[in-house]
Image: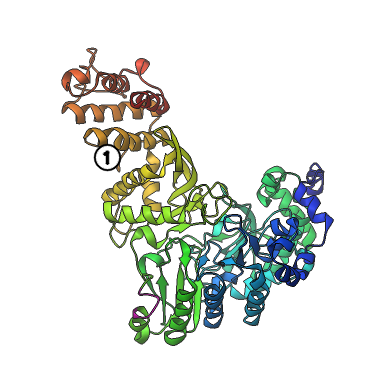
Amino acid sequence: MKLAEISARHIKVNKIEKMKQSRDPMEAWRRLEEYAAGGVESIPEEDRSYFLKSFGIYDRPATPGLFMMRIRIPGGRLTSRQARVLGELSRDYGRDYMDLTTRAQIQLRYLRIEDIPTIIRKMEEVGISSWQTGVDNFRNIVTDPLDGLAYDNIIRTSPLVKELQSLWLHKEEWIAALPRKFNTAISGSMTNRCNLFAHDCCFALANRQGEYGFNVYLGGKVGAIAQSAGVFLRIDELTEFYEALIETYRDYGFRDNRNKNRLHFLIKEAGMATLIEAVQERAGRAFDEAGETLVKEPRLEERDGRIRLRDGAWALHMVVPSGIFSGTAMIEAAQNAEQYGSGTLNISTTQNLYLLGIPERRREAALSAKPFDRYRNLSSPYFNQMVACAGIDLCPFGVIPNKSDAIEMSEYLEKEVPLPADASIRMHWSACVKGCGVHELGDVGFVGCKAKEEGKSVYGVHIQIGGKSTLSQEEAYTILKSIPLSRAKKYVAQLARAYKDLRRDRESFERFESRVFRCYSKGALEFILRWNVEFAEPAGYEPLQFLSDWPANPEHNEIFLLGERIYKKLCGERPYQGTHLYNPIEKTPATPLHQKNPEIPKALSQIIMKMIAPSPKRYEVFTEVLTELGGLKG
């Protein structure tokens, strides 16, 4: 079936599409001076809620009467002049506050509508735009923050980013023309420094028959990693393919259900082969089959802080916790880059900042200058790659405060489970399921939610682990749901402690999770964490330890193994003289735990005895064990 036939099944259009059909989106832009003169109340609801967002201007319910502007920074790269202007705009019009975002952009907040035309003019003077940074448009194209500079950079992509965005940026026919937002990433490096596989369209450095180019991955979104399209592109084929792809999505993407109209859902229903067939038809040519993807190296720059570039100069990393920056600090960073470096800065998708082109003779002077007095060049592994989107204080979708929660968690872990300098752990926080914190790619991911604590509704998180950025491009999986924030740090500390105790030299959490935690079932992981935090610690029992040689097993067998270990920890003896195939050899039942240790409550003893019972009498899955343990707390 052709793509047009599949798209024709979705004949209904949602209310946003109907609104888009009712007027020209450019009208909101043309009336901006009028709105500035008339104030907030003069802005029609459809412009406040939708059309102004096409130009990066957001009315934020969390800050009534004040606006947020999302500024497009292609590839995250800024000249010192641009950085200084953005800093001055933040300082003069936005309470000296700015966010560095996971798309390597800048967001200015607390802006009055009366000041926005002036802000736009000042940005345009230095070649900066906020166009098409919201709603159904092409979002900022991300790439390696060390593009063209790092030793492992094979293809410089900055010119390609400009070429790709020239297809639609500032083009009236493309304003709000898509069914939904469209994220693009491209990397010509062997290290994944831009969360490469989390976007609608991803171009990954590849080699095919001795020729460098890009393999294409499509359909990434929150909860889904982009999949190979089976296509290899030479550098001079990139724009041709991209233009055909975006036109295909514009024409055939679904416009009925806004929750299911990203490119991912078109691929899911039509199939990748059908989509690529339509793209090739539109391009009027076929493209070669995929080569070998070369983006395989772990991102370590945040861990090292100071990165030697291939021209001999240095890039200096600046840790910006949760991306919370200030206009004053950006002005200082611009001055630093200008005085000591090449006058170039780069925002990263980890919401941090790089000062580029620092000669070795000036490196220490740059590190001694502002704003390094407040933003560390090298922090702890918990902060170096931490990501957190805006929460309830600034975002209408946020469920938890988020940015402050992320900082509090990292500070707690720094104190309770300090990691060596060669460790690497990526903690990604999303304040809601929309996933702007890219939680699905984190080593440890957090999704804001409501939770129950002592019968009251409180801020909480779902906790995930196992996101892969370099090995297999996998999204993280959930191990704990609806955990109150007051207790979440204790569970994560258990994971961090296992990483600290069992990791190999220079082993990242990403690789550690594959080697150790993946041997456990999700049920076993949850059980160990809950047992240690909710039972062992309060009662003063010795906690269960994770093992690096845990045998992969069905939950039924894991229950037996963990039950044996708990029994021995609580009474000092093994329950059986011998076991075979996860069952006792002897026919005599084990002595009840509470008889061995009278301090153990009988009800808890009975649960543990059922964990180590012969197969027919044992729990089958960990949910059964946890349910009965939960009853003890009630």
From the viewer's perspective, tell me whether residue 162 is left or right of residue 615.
Answer: right
In the figure, 36 relative to 23: above or below?
below
State which quarter of the image contains the N terminus: top right
Residue 372 part of the magenta segment? yes
- The residue lying at 35 percent from left, 59 percent from top is 381
The residue positioned farthest toward the right in the image shown? 22
Q: Is residue 13 left or right of residue 222?
A: right
Q: Which residue is mark 1?
A: 545
Where residue 52 appears, as percent x and y from the top left, is: 71, 63
Q: Decide which of 86, 158 is in the foreground and name it.
A: 86
Residue type at tag 1: Gln
Give the number of marks: 1
Q: Does residue 331 sit above or below 218 in this rendering? A: below
Give the image quarter of residue 535: top left
Where is residue 401 shown, x and y percent of the image? 47, 52
Give coordinates of residue 621: x percent, y percent: 41, 26
Write the residue at 61% across / 66% down: 69
Question: Which is nearer the eye, 566 or 17?
Answer: 17
Which residue occupies the foreground of this view, 542 or 99? 99
Residue at image coords 75%, 61%: 244
Q: Position of residue 530 (x, y in %)?
A: 35, 35
Q: Which residues are magenta?
A: 368-373
Apparent side of residue 451 relative to residue 633 in the rendered image (left or right): right
